Amino acid sequence: MTFKEFKFALDQTNVFVTESTAKQLFQKSDLDNSGTIDVTGFEIVLMVYDALHLDKFGLTTFDAFYSFDIDNRESLDETQFIQAIQALKQNQDEDNDALANLFQRKVKARSEKRIDFDDFKRLWCYHVCDPIMELSRLGIEPPAKKANILLRLLHARNRSSSLCDQLFEAIGRLDCIFTDGIPEMRDKVIQLRLEAQRQRYSRKRANEITSKQLQRIAAVHSSQQNKDKRKKKKREQIKQVEQSINSCQIDDNVIEAQKLSRTIQNKMIIDKKEKFSALHSNSVYLAGGDKLTLHDAGIREVPTSIYFGQVERSKLADLIIVDLSGNKLASLPGIDFVFNLSSVRKLNISRNRITHLPIEISNLTSLEILYMEKNSLDYIPKEIGCLKKLVHIDISDNRLASLPHEFCQLLSICTIVAHTNFLDLLPGNIGNLESLESLDVSRNSLTNLPATFSNLGFLKRLEMTHNKVTELPDDMGNLFSLEFIDLSYNRLQVSNTCPTSVL
């Protein structure tokens, strides 16, 4: 049960305690700090309440302190202190100013103007209450009547008397009376339950011994039967294994024969395809169908007669060389023309007016040489990275300001001609082009080279004239294959910017 349910259960059993006492009883019963207690814990609380007569003491200092500690800070401020004292005094009048002065003297040297429970008890015992009356209320025999008068006089003159000490100790014992009572009562309940559990276990053990003797006799008989069954099953398994081995050997021979047959069939199919392909390529070559030459024809668009119709598009797939240079083309048909040039190895579209390339260029997977100089290209599509066999590309005399990141996926590229553009930087991953041997980026707006430039270990020729380069990468000297380099008409200063690896 939760604390709310615990309080409701106390009310139903006519156990009336203050909120703080109920909370303390609940916390002492909640051994695992789960915020709940079981029925056994509640029963133990009732036992402690009945055994210790907690209801006979009325309002205690513990109750008063924690009833006014509304913010659960384990301390009281001045207002809360005065209210708690008034509650303890009940109908007796008490000077609030005197209590306030008493409080201020106690916290004078402290930064936080609050008192804890121990301070509260001391102020109550030594400065506020009548110790004789309090001892009597707590059931402690007061001194003799004559001595009582003397002690009252002594109490009025000296609050630190032994009588106040006796009261302070008595209040301390009262505050923790259920703290010791709950564990003690719980230990007794646990001992009683353990004893009952031992007795039940003894009876159960005796029954188990008798049952085990009967089970042992039955187990011996069953074991013998199982042993005979295992022997019989083992003989059957051995027979099945022998049969399976013979069957597997036959199956293996059949499988091997099938594999050999499939291998021979596949080889025959491949040989037939290669022979047909060779014959087809030879016939196309002899017929001149492997080339498309329309250079310097003055055309403004690719003639539809070349790609319109299924037969014409199938002929495009046989082309090896396409030359459309020296015309006035502004664009290339994508899905109808470029997409079908899957076998082209050399494509020349230089000296035209082309502003962009169709994305279908990604289907030119056999392309090795690409000429696009002297056009009006202002960007290269990222699909350029699909041309894995490309070894030479010329994109000079265009309007390119940058190259796509995918440009550096051309791992077979050997020559890049990109002079006379508006390039202000090269791709950061240009170092991936490990096969690059010649690079011409003259007449651009480059200011520096990427840090990965020094990874171009096969670079033999570098032309970078007429740029704005101010410094070279630190590892420029790692280009061990470099045979020719031209950096003229830049902003380099050898004394300040030339890497030590070059010097």
Image (cartoon, rainbow, N blue to C red):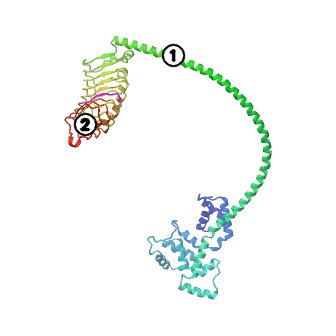
- Three-letter amino acid code at the position of disc 2: Leu
Residue 400 placed where, x, y %?
27, 32
Say whether disc 1 or disc 2 marks the residue closer to the N-terminus. 1
Pair 1/2: label in front: 1
Q: Secondary structure at mark 2?
A: loop
Judging depth in this view, the residue of 129 and 246 nearest the camera is 246
Quadrant position of the C terminus in the picture: top left
**In the figure, 398 relative to 261: above or below?**
below
Q: Is residue 14 visible?
A: no
Residue drawn at point x = 61 percent, y = 81 percent = 133
Judging depth in this view, the residue of 306 and 229 nearest the camera is 229
- Three-letter amino acid code at the position of disc 1: Ile
Q: Which residue is mark 1?
A: 264
Q: Does the magenta portion include 418?
A: yes
Q: Which residues are drawn in magenta?
A: 410-419
Q: Which residue is mark 2?
A: 446
**In the figure, 293 relative to 498: above or below?**
above
Quadrant position of the N terminus in the picture: bottom right
Q: Does the magenta portion include 486?
A: no
